């Protein structure tokens, strides 16, 4: 909830005593999406602002190592000037620094999340490049906003309707889904009016102790207050101030998520290694169990040597008295292209190879059993490891390449419209032809479901399938199909046919226009174009 409006409001209030009248030394950037305001005094040293649309935040830091190279100084007009006020918009996630006659705005709004500087001569500059038209819109909007330095709770009173929470959220978009979930959770057990419950949740954000909820098993970490009930957790860490909680949260978030990511890689590798090694052991045990045929091949070679005169060139087999078993005969296969002597040599060679291969199989069996013991030992050990360095050692031992620096498919999900059906199923919707291609070819996984309204232009829609073995209910498929129809030219139809298939059957051939694909197989659902019940739109913020 680090980007929640009311947490930002509390952050502003706690930060004011530290920031007001403090002189800015410089503003610079050396990391993508991060802006640093440097003060260089004992009271406050740095403010870090992250404008990554997926995880925007503003944070006070005691330490920050400025690089000697690859550092870009920005907004030089603010250097050696004092901060006169530090406020938040009364109805939006916009934080404003007033610095003399200049303003610096940190605004959270999806892909347009940015830091904007506004000067008295109407000049406007952005940290991340924006179109001039967008900048002008922002300048106009900022001038119309009311900014406050008090904790701002909206008017929540309304008739206690069944859809009260959703109605309040639509009226006040600053009330995030987490706040609604928390209010709904409390309404189950608390006998109060819904507007009172919602007011209590926001009051708690203002007054209760900031708390970090950690779920190591799922690799999840949340910042809220100690009265919140909605976050599953293994343990918690509670703080007296939001400033200290938030700083710790940002550090802890990285370690918890990095640990979970590495454990996931290690567990996947362990599972693959165990299957591979177990198959090897089974095959080797079968070989060793059959025993060596060295003696059998040596015996045949000797019998042929003893009976060289009996073996005729061109014969495919020979029947001989088995001198090793008096009174019995043995049929020996021959290579008709070889002489009797060379046939004997062939069996002696097979005896030597059999001896070598049998010994190797025994040695490999012992080795693979030790490997399996090692893998099982690592599997037991990893869940008690806290130090990331130890996990790195195990990854190196298992020869796992860390792909963390490569762009993750999940990083681009903020580019699409995002819905959650029945609080469980994630659905992503393309915004235009180019975005459809990105969704289908770069983001969607092979076992995700892919949807598109038939015979009309519209968005590509992807239903994320986290577990390929899970059977997706037909009702969820129909609801996703309704979303696909809703985001198409068939939106106003009473009913609309929607094609769906697994992503692996969707082909983008070379030379196809943007947004155009070919389906190798498909099924059709006839649905009403709509945003179905129990389907929540998640903003890209």
Image (cartoon, rainbow, N blue to C red):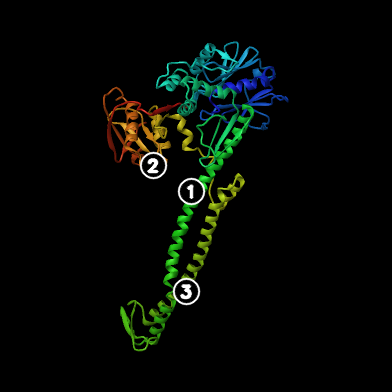
Asked if residue 426 lies left or right of residue 108, the reply is left
Q: Position of residue 389 (x, y in %)?
A: 61, 46
Q: Position of residue 153 (x, y in %)?
A: 53, 17
Q: Residue at x 38, y 39 (%)?
A: 448
Q: Position of residue 92 (x, y in %)?
A: 52, 18
Mark nearer the N terminus (1 vs 2): 1
Question: Within 10 angstroms of label 3, few (less than 14), some, or many (20 or more) residues?
Answer: some
Instruction: Tell me if residue 414 can be seen.
Output: yes
Q: Return the residue at label 1.
A: 268
- Of circles 1 and 3, which is in front? 1
Question: Within 10 angstroms of label 1, few (less than 14), some, or many (20 or more) residues?
Answer: few
Q: Residue at x 60, y 44 (%)?
A: 388
Q: Return the residue at label 2.
A: 446
**Which residue of the protein is positioned furthest toward the front in this rendering?**
191
Secondary structure found at label 3: helix
Q: Give 181 or 17, whichever is nearer the viewer.
A: 181
The disc placed on residue 355 is 3
Q: Give 457 or 451, whichever is nearer the viewer.
A: 451
Secondary structure found at label 1: helix
Q: Position of residue 277 (x, y in %)?
A: 47, 58
Instruction: Tell me if residue 72 can be seen.
Output: no
């Amino acid at each position: 909830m680090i980007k929640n409006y009311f947490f930002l409001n509390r952050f502003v209030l706690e930060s004011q005593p530290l920031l007001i009248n403090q002189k800015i030394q410089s503003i610079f950037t050396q990391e993508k999406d991060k802006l640093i305001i440097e003060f260089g005094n004992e009271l406050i040293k740095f403010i870090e602002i992250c404008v990554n649309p997926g995880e925007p935040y503003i944070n006070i830091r005691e330490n920050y190592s400025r690089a000697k190279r690859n550092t870009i100084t920005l907004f030089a007009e603010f250097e050696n000037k004092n901060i006169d006020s530090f406020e938040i918009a009364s109805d939006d996630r916009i934080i404003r620094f007033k610095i003399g006659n200049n303003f610096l705005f940190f605004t959270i709004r999806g892909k347009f999340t940015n830091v904007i500087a506004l000067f008295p001569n109407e000049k406007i500059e952005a940290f991340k490049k924006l179109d001039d038209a967008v900048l002008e819109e922002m300048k106009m909007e900022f001038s119309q906003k009311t900014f406050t330095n008090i904790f701002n709770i909206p008017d929540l009173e309304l008739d206690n309707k069944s859809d009260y929470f959703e109605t309040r959220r639509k009226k006040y978009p600053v009330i995030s889904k987490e706040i609604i979930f928390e209010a709904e959770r409390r309404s189950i057990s608390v006998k109060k009016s819904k507007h009172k419950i919602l007011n209590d949740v926001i009051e708690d954000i203002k007054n209760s102790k900031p708390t970090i909820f950690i779920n190591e098993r799922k690799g999840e970490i949340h910042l809220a207050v100690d009265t919140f009930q909605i976050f599953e957790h293994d343990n918690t860490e509670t703080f007296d101030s939001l400033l200290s909680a938030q700083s710790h949260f940002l550090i802890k978030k990285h370690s918890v998520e990095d640990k979970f990511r590495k454990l996931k890689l290690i567990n996947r590798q362990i599972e693959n290694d165990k299957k591979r090694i177990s198959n090897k052991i089974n095959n080797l045990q079968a070989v060793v169990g059959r025993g060596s045929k060295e003696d059998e091949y040596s015996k045949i070679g000797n019998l042929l040597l003893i009976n060289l005169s009996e073996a005729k060139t061109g014969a495919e087999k020979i029947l001989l008295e088995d001198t090793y078993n008096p009174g019995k005969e043995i049929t020996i296969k021959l290579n008709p292209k070889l002489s009797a002597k060379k046939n004997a040599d062939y069996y002696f060679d097979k005896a030597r190879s059999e001896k070598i291969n049998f010994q190797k199989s025994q040695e490999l069996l012992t080795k693979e059993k030790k490997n399996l013991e090692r893998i099982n030992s690592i599997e037991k050990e990893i869940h008690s490891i806290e130090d990331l360095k130890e996990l790195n050692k195990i990854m190196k031992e298992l020869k796992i390449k860390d792909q963390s620096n490569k762009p993750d498919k999940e990083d681009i999900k903020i580019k699409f419209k995002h819905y959650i059906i029945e609080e469980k199923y994630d659905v992503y919707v393309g915004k235009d032809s180019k975005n459809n291609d990105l969704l289908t070819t770069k983001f969607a996984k092979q076992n995700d479901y892919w949807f598109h309204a038939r015979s009309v232009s519209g968005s590509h829609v992807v239903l994320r399938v986290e577990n390929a073995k899970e059977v997706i209910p037909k009702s969820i498929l129909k609801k996703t199909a309704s979303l696909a129809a809703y985001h198409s030219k068939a939106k106003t139809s009473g009913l609309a046919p929607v094609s769906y298939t697994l992503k692996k059957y969707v082909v983008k051939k070379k030379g196809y226009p943007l947004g155009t694909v070919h389906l190798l197989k498909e099924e059709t659902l006839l649905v009403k174009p709509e945003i179905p019940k129990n389907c929540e739109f998640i903003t890209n913020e």
